[in-house]
Image: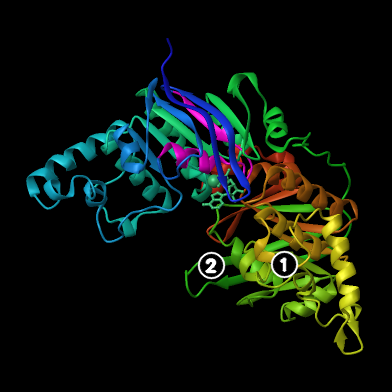
Amino acid sequence: MTINAVEMKNISKSFGSVKANDSIDFSVKKGEIHCLLGENGAGKSTLVKILFGLYNKDQGQIKINNKPVKINNPAGAIKEKMGMIHQHFMLVDRFSIIENIIAGQEPTRTWGTSIDKKKAAVKVKEISQNFGFDLDPEALIENLSVGEQQRVEIMKALYREAEILILDEPTAVLTPQETEELFEIMESLKEDNKTIIFITHKLNETMEIADRITILRDGKKIGTVNKNDTTPQKLANMMVGREVLLDLEKSSKNPGKEIFSIKNLSYKNPVSGLELNEINISFKKGEIVGLAGVEGNGQLELEEIIAGLKAPDSGEILFNSQKITKVSTRERRNMGLAHIPSDRNKYGLVGNFSLAKNILLGSEWNPEFKNKFMIDFDYLNNYTDQILKEYDVRFSGKNSRASELSGGNQQKLIIGRELSRGAEFVLAAQPTRGVDIGAIEFIHRQLLKIREEDKAVFLISAELDELMSLSDRILVIYEGNIVARGKVEDFDQEELGLLMAGHSREER
Ligand SMILES: Nc1ncnc2c1ncn2[C@@H]1O[C@H](COP(=O)(O)OP(=O)(O)O)[C@@H](O)[C@H]1O
Ligand SMILES: [Mg+2]
């Protein structure tokens, strides 16, 4: 008989009128990596929070190792040898790794006595070595990267003898390299017959790491499949509930004349010290130029300089052969620059403004929206309705504020606003971050449409799939330098990953 490490039967949970989990059956075999896949709001977190005793279920049964259990709180779950790694870590900054790991564990007896602390240290070191955590137990949390802190959380669970590990979207906060490192740790845990529930909404991660996959949509279980019997396309269709085109057709076309360029641009970030070094990029009509890089290597600085939010220390920016280096953001927009910002909350939307007012943002001075000296609200409302329809923005009521939209719909609102103005140069920074695959497909179509209309797109993205499928040319940025550039056909994903991590082309 196979042992099901976890068996959840007929689980339901509502929040008010929202059925977050609707009669879900979910079982996980001992020793497997089981992916829980679904779009935002599908009910994944709710299901594992019920399992871990953080939420009370409205109905249903749970078995652990084929035995019925009642789990009323996390302490109960830990007793059943479960461990959960949350998205927000619960570590004390000024304590060492080891102190964090043993804190909270039998505090009255263990905490403070040096002998027990020594014993604990031995155990922590053992865990670290056995599973390849590669951490110094004496290091302070405040000196660790996000990926390292996450590893401490996993070690903490293992220290408490967890056999079933629940990881809720652990890769959302990780760089591609850190994700690979996490996957290696997960593999070595699996070799030790640990059971892992791994939540994600990313297809490539699922296909890389899962043994089996359970797909949720709108609170319902759609199915459980073996990784080897499925494809990304099938998974996408199950997640979204309709046919999703993962690979969009890109026409072959020759780029036209240069429309935008950056010449010898340098800038030093006074806070981080990061330096952009003599950046040169030329953008031609009808092409998408992709910028690949691990976040924090100068993309944000470059984005802000192009948008006019920051001034470079030296160098020039030309738009339609006109120098715009010192031109204001507003002026740049009027000249035909659109900006889909990487930080939607800072530059994209005003959360407590209505949708229409957000559509007006940046165009307050545009005569199109004015009736003499006043904003023409009839016109604005019509215009907004059109954008909401054309860009498929889903909202609950006419008077919705931007903050009430889901992340994907906020992004579609920004994209609608930016692309409906007939811009000739589109600066699209992380345009699909935090967005569901249905909306990603839509956003990709819009960017390809811009290319078809012979306008230029500068696509700054941390998603290699996105860069490879949309770009005509690719540049790689590392520590403020463009370290490689070429036609998209000249790169493969693995090479891009290496270049992004700072390896040069010759080294390979
Ligand atoms: N604590 C809560 N209070 C109210 N609604 C919630 C709560 N947690 C989740 N929901 C709702 O339940 C649904 C499922 O959410 P969740 O389980 O977090 O989805 P996922 O993890 O798949 O993104 C969503 O509509 C969400 O808004
Ligand atoms: Mg979630």
Q: How many marks?
A: 2
Q: Are marks 2 and 1 in contact (CB under 8 Å)?
A: no
Point 58% across, 65% down: residue? 277
For label 2, the SS is strand
Q: Is residue 353 left or right of residue 334?
A: left
Q: Could you tell which of marks 2 and 1 lies nearer the N-terminus?
A: 1
- Mark 1: which amino acid? Ile
Q: Quadrant of residue 383?
A: bottom right
How far is disc 2 from disc 1 in space, using C-alphas?
Answer: 16 Å
Residue 120 versus residue 285 in the image, above or below? above
**Would you call the spot at circle 1 few (<14 residues within 10 Å), some (14-19), or many (20 or more)?**
many
- Secondary structure state at the residue bearing disc 1: strand
Q: Please report the bounds of the magenta region as a residue range.
A: 32-52
Q: Is residue 193 above or below residue 424?
A: above
Q: Residue at x 69, y 65 (%)?
A: 402
Vertical position of residue 280 compared to residue 218: above or below: below
Residue indicated by mark 1: 262
Give the amino acid type for the residue marked by disc 2 in the picture.
Glu
Task: Work out whether residue 133 or residue 259 is closer to the camera in this orientation and state it.
Answer: 133
* Image x and y of residue 196, in percent: 44, 31
Residue 99 colored in magenta in the image: no
As drawn, is 317 to the left or to the right of 379?
Answer: left
Name the disc covering residue 275, or none: 2
Image coordinates of residue 111 in percent, x first then y, are: 15, 50
Asked whether residue 504 appears in the rendered view, the answer is no
Whether residue 504 sits left or right of residue 411 in the image: it is left
